[in-house]
Image (cartoon, grey):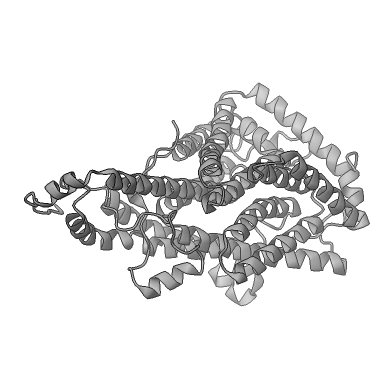
Amino acid sequence: MPLKPHVFDYEPVSRSGAGARNFESVFDPPEDKEAPLNNVPATAPAPEINPNDKEELAANNAARSLLIKRGHAVTFVGLFLFTALVYFRPYEVFPSLKWTSSSAFWVALATMAVFVPSQLALEGKITIKSRQITLMLLLLLGVLLSVPLAMNRAMAWGGFVEFLKVVIVFVMLVNVLRTETRMRLLINLILVVSCWMSISAANDYRLGIFNLPGARIEGIIGGLFDNPNDMALHLVMMIPIATAFYFTSRHLIGKIIYPICVAVMIAGIVASFSRGGFLALMAATAFMIWRLATRHRALFLTVAIVFASAFIALAPGDYQTRIATTGDSSSIQRQNDLKRSIIVLIHHPVFGVGINNYVLFSNTDHATHNAYTQVGAELGVPAMAIYLLFLFSSLKPLRKVGSETSHNDPKSRYRYLAAGLEASLIGYMVASFFASVAYLWYLYYVVAYGICLTRLYHATQAQALTVKARKDQPESARRTIAHEPKPSLSLS
């Protein structure tokens, strides 16, 4: 089912006032006709109030708005801190902070402890309804079912626990990202990490510091990003989003900083020497141009081809050689693992060989280097189908937002942000064909951003329809309603 609008879930984080408005204006465009709904009643049952009676609406909304405005503010702070710990990993950069190595787990646990009662108080249920959440829970079930049949159950159980963490954080993100400000804050945090990694990678390449086989740099941040291919995949996903932020920024500082971020991250991809990253960057760039170009698409795509040619021509000679080479030992090994993972998938089609267990079936003791066959070989064909549905169901709402805004309001910030997030997912789908990243954070944060943006867009559309209905109401009917007795308000 298409994602349904939930109008009443999205309210400003802070109290209304000059200070709150100034704070939000740093990250959001000024309020306009596209701003999310303000002072909308909560999802709890409300008394019957005629929408034309503005005084009653104002009173009802004023009574309800404070709780909603504060909804999940503490949980968002926890998620923000958790994301900073997961992406920055400060204990690796500063040895004196080694004692904080498990801090992300405890922050996530505390955040979940705050989230559950807050969510139940706000909406009366543990999560909103979303096709992506349903599919992710089904994928988690597939992971769990693969554990008893795994050759190494300890490895499989460890993989289940790690993916369970991803699922829990994803569910919290979908419910907590209630405003564009929160989404932008989180993305800007990750952009800082991305630029830092890119600058370090480019500097290591300049100095000839190659710590990995094949004369390749190692990411400055471990965990998710020490592998240059995984780092390139992440940077590819962030570049379209940073580009969308540039188009939607109403401040000079944004118009300056975001293009710099894009240039720095492109340099990081070059320094990574990732062929998959290069292909994904070209695909994401072409896709975003296609989405945003309302006319003369062929001309813009020609420009994109010229850009790609210039990109390769201006890149270091070693990078050009790397991109053009498909018969080296690394490429051959990846091709062999891809074939081997397909064979394992055919022989274990229902539940797979268990999460994290493919390495035991590999001829080279390596992962599949392909997210799709990774899921298929380790969890089975049904889980792989669920994974693919998750990807495409995440694209569909964004495509709908982009299509509607391109016709109704081509300059809408929702159009640019939807195109950026959609291009980010396209980049992931291409790059993940060369990386075993199906259970990692990269994808799920961006999908959560997409759900947030889509629901904000639907809230804005609902507000516009409500305003239009009020304007269309006959003047005589308004006068009649104004003289009727006012029903008493109850928040019970």
Residue that appears at 21% across and 47% down: 475
Task: Choose top left, top right, bottom left or bottom right for residue 57.
Answer: bottom left
Q: Which quarter of the image is occupied by the N terminus?
A: top left
* Residue 50 visible to the viewer: no
Q: Position of residue 39 (x, y in %)?
A: 29, 58
Q: Nearer the viewer, residue 22 or 50?
A: 50
Left or right for 79, reference 462? right
Q: Nearer the viewer, residue 392 or 91?
A: 392
Above or below 371: residue 194: below
Left or right for 11, reference 58? right
Q: Position of residue 317 (x, y in %)?
A: 93, 55
Task: Choose top left, top right, bottom left or bottom right for residue 359.
Answer: top right
Q: Position of residue 53 (x, y in %)?
A: 18, 52
Q: Position of residue 259 (x, y in %)?
A: 69, 63
Q: Nearer the viewer, residue 68 or 370?
A: 68
Residue that appears at 86% across and 46% down: 323
Q: Nearer the viewer, residue 241 or 294?
A: 294
